[in-house]
Amino acid sequence: MAGGPPCQPFSLGGKHGAFADKRDMFPTTIDVIRKVKPKAFLIENVKGLTRIKFYNYLEYIKLQLEFPDLLIDNDEDWLTHLSRLQKEHTSERRFGLTYDVLATVLNAADLGVPQLRQRFFIVGFRHDLHARWHFPIPTHSKLGLLHDLLVTGSYWDRHAVPRKIHSLALKRIRNIHKSTLPSLYDQTFGKPWLTVRDALHDLPDPRDKDASTRYQNHVFQPGAKSYPGHTGSPLDWPSKTLKAGDHGVPGGENMLVLPSGEVRYFTVRESARLQTFPDGYVFHGSWTEAMRQLGNAVPVSLGRIIAGSIALKLLEIQETNLKTEKKAA
């Protein structure tokens, strides 16, 4: 079972109501797990849920997922219920439906998504499966990208970017990451982070008259402006986290900064690329509505990596059980 309870109760841009927010659907999520009893579950939410302000409530969520059958009593508040769950956890007893639960924050860029998107994931395997599982190990790195940009120059060669165009970008990158430069030599970094240019390299400029006929949802959106605190995403770096705000996006996360300094809004298709949706996936509604959908989404390739890892582990367990049954027969 996989899902993402609404993030607004825990988001940095929200009201931080947590359990007091009527949009908190973690109780419903836990209730569904209790009823369905899946072999494994995957839950996604914002990194803001891990803040110290929500420490006790996050602990409460994880322990309820570990012991979904240990229900809250009618005369209990959630903190009293939390104490009972903690007692059960330290007793190491495992009666009824229980899960082995792991939780971590992952940066989508570290797993090949062209976007700096940190999200919190909780994964649980039913305890009777005795699953030995861990979150996917990062495959891409910031240092790998800096090495390709500043040391070998292979990034610029790959995109056939003339030196006179990328020199300004190089100067800016060197200034921002000058403390990192000495560590870029004599090391192996694995794959580089993917950038906005990597994601959009084969898309035409949306201002071209035939751009929207060649690619669906690739329509130019006018009106982008840059000002302090609203600076957009550089072309030669992973994008900022795409967001879905009720009153606009204050950090310019839905805006592209070109090497010339010019800014424009990402089209829906470009944003979908940054979220690793296939080009055949069509979004409906206005630009604002489509961007809200994309800002609320989990990057497709990130979801595939994590969910695929869980599915592979379940298949391994199934295969092991079948071999054991054949030996016993």
Image (cartoon, rainbow, N blue to C red):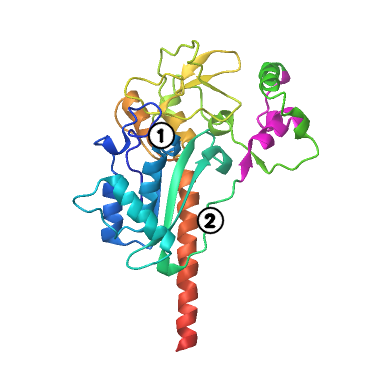
Please state which amino acid type lies under the numbered disc 1.
Lys
Q: Which residue of the protein is positioned furthest toward the right in this rendering?
A: 186
The part of the chain drawn in magenta is 139-163
Side of 176 where 187 appears, left or right: right
Whether the magenta-drawn stretch holds residue 150 is answered as yes
| Residue 53 badge | 1
Observer-nearest residue: 21 or 253? 21
Quadrant including the C terminus? bottom left
Residue 40: tell me if it is visible. no
Query: Which is more N-terminal, label 2 or label 1?
Result: 1
Label 1 neighbour load within 10 Å: few <14, some 14-19, many 20+: few
Name the residue beneath numbered marker 2. 134
Q: Main secondary structure of the magenta part?
A: helix
> Which residue appears at 40% of the width and 18% of the height?
221
Q: Position of residue 279 (x, y in %)?
A: 44, 38
Q: CA distance from mark 1 to mark 2?
A: 27 Å
Q: Secondary structure at mark 1?
A: helix
Side of 271 where 194 appears, left or right: right
Residue 329: tell me if it is visible. yes
Q: Position of residue 176 (x, y in %)?
A: 66, 21
Quadrant including the N terminus? bottom left
> Which residue appears at 31% of the width and 57% of the height?
68
Observer-nearest residue: 317 or 301? 317
Observer-nearest residue: 311 or 235? 311
